[in-house]
Image: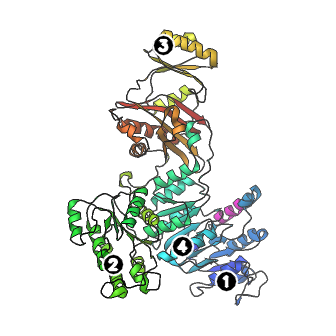
Amino acid sequence: MGRDLSALFDPESVAVVGASDDPAKYGHAVAAQALRAPDRRPVHLVNRRGGTVLGRTTATSLAGIGEPVELVVISVPGPGFEAAVDDALACGARAIVGITAGFAETGPLGLARQQAIAERVRAAGAVLVGPNCLGIADNTTELYLASDRFAPGGIALLSQSGNLALELHLRCAPHGLGFSRFVSLGNQADVTLVDLIEEAARHDPTRAIAVYAEDFGDGRAFAEAAAAAGKPVVLLTAGRGTASARSAQSHTGALTTSSDVVAAACRDAGVELVATPHEMTVVLAALNGGRRATGHRTAVCTDGGGHGAIAADAAESAGLAVPELGPAAQQRLRTLLWEQSAVGNPVDLAGMGEQNPHSYGDTVGALLALDEVDSVMLTGYFGGYSAATGGLGGPAAESGTAGGGSALAAGELETAHQMAVHAARTAKPLVVQSMFPDAPSCRTLVEAGIPVFASTEDAARALAAMTVAGAAGPPGVRPLPPSAAPLSDPGYHGVRTLLSAAGVPFPEAREINDEAQLLAAADTFEGPYVLKALHLLHKSDAGGVALGLPDRSALVTAFREMHARLGAASYSVEAMADPTDGVELIVGVNRDPRFGPVAMVGLGGVLTEALHDVAFALAPVPAARAEQLLTGLRTAALLRGVRGRPAVDLAAAAAVIERLTTLAAAHPEITEIEVNPLLVRPDGALALDARAVLA
């Protein structure tokens, strides 16, 4: 059920410690907001000097209030924070909001103070938001304990930045979006982002969860909570471009960055990852109505060929498809439009909208009704006629049609209502891009829950957010398996043995130290042979791999030459795999400090780092998801067979990925493990090399 945060969002009483009449102090802003709803619950202002604040008599201490207080906001100088926390707990507080800064963000000593405070709060059965936060607000319970107002609505905003939260508030307003709750995360000493996501998931008035986070804390728990929320979660985060904490002792470690890890966690959890506050607003506007497309087939409708072509390109760039409509659909559209209209997709009214604004609504309604269409984008001039009469910069001149501009404006408003009716009859998304997004007809659409955007790329991004990737299945993060006995031999053959026991197939191999052992190994299986010098980071680059040695004589010659050149402590003699019609892959797991084991799959062999054709997911990775990762690679055509080559056994490769990533997830002592290459042929998969790095 998660933690009980009821006292945080709907307390019976509130006190603001550090309330002030000085507008420069945060205690002034919080106190002013708290007093916006004085009839909802008792609001007590505390100032150690007494007197009045904002016209209200203050208490000099929490004890001086004379009655218990359920939620206490503390905005006092740093040295007095601990005493204020103790006073709050003594007066029965079940929730504390710590505005005061100067703790973990200042270094080890501040962190130690913060941890001690959090332990006292938890021991008392209370909860603490912050410290170093900017407050909270809950519009559904009239709880206003932040410095600014947030328009009411269905979005829970959880942010580590106060200014970004304010920007989102401003950007959301034109889309008719508001907030159910706002929580400034602060240092997350006690109440964490995960706690707040779980609470927002249980909060009926919250329809979507918007997160700005710089510190995930337990990133894997964040992904699990987001996947289980049952509501859209949109994430904006910073610092994704820097390399995560990793070793450079394997391809997996060298190729895995924090941006890859966060993106993989979001894909697996079903989280919409955005790069800017603007993009977050676009996605929130798209998800607000709850509509979802079950496929990628988008119909584009326009009253101008240029807008239609640009919109089609933008839709395809966003991962959508703009297929040509079938003969029956085109014939249906021809009964609605005039001769010069294009009906293939994009559907171009070709000026008919100016003659008859209702043609917009008729066409959109017909497109939404088609079984071969999953979503519709209306793009271009719609909104321009009502913009003229609304003084918003639309066409000022008469159009030449009966009734002139005012008649066109009235018709456009009517067709906006008509489109709203059509949209209400289906679960398919309708998104509008307009040159006049503030026009009365466009505002009518927004009020009906139809997103309207000024730019084509925003409309396409919105549709992409509203499109369910059916093949990927529902989001989910597989739980980590129980920890297995630690790996005791991280050497090449020790790793092979561990993986073999987990069901990863390898060729026959023997570890040898001298020529006598080499000959004995050659007697146990037939050539051709492979000889590898062990304990080298990149064996191929160092000339530590000899392939296709046809017999014992060639094997001995290669050993003598390699040993004279490298002097390795040991070698591996292996049966040579048949590479005919095969494709080399890499499969690895890197243990991220925030998100735990992260799997990487991609094109392998000696060109892995040069080609950088890899995909990521949180480990363990089930076989079905592994196949999706493989078929999503840029070079996936190689796996399906090209230029007369047969397709390889994707199911066998996926099975190896599942086994390796499950094993890695069960071994927390392994920071990196990989098989490279994994040779996948039409008749199965075979691991040809392996490496592990211990913590």
Tell me which numbered mark, 1 or 3, is placed earlier along the sequence: 1
Q: Is residue 120 magenta?
A: yes
Q: CA distance from mark 3 to mark 2?
A: 84 Å
Single out the mark in the foreground, 4 or 3: 4
Q: Secondary structure at mark 1?
A: strand
Earlier sequence position, callout 4 versus callout 1: 1
Q: Which residue is mark 3?
A: 522
| Residue position for label 1 | 44
Tell me which amino acid carries mark 2: Glu
Instruction: Identify the coloring.
Output: rainbow
Q: CA distance from mark 4 to mark 1?
A: 33 Å
Q: Earlier in the sequence, mark 2 or mark 4?
A: 4
Q: Quadrant of the C terminus?
A: top right
Question: Residue under circle 2?
Answer: 354
Residue 232 shows in this picture: yes
Q: Which residues are magenta?
A: 114-124
Instruction: Find out whether residue 608 is within the magenta segment.
Output: no
| Residue 610 occupies quadrant | top right
Which of marks 1 and 2 precedes in the sequence?
1
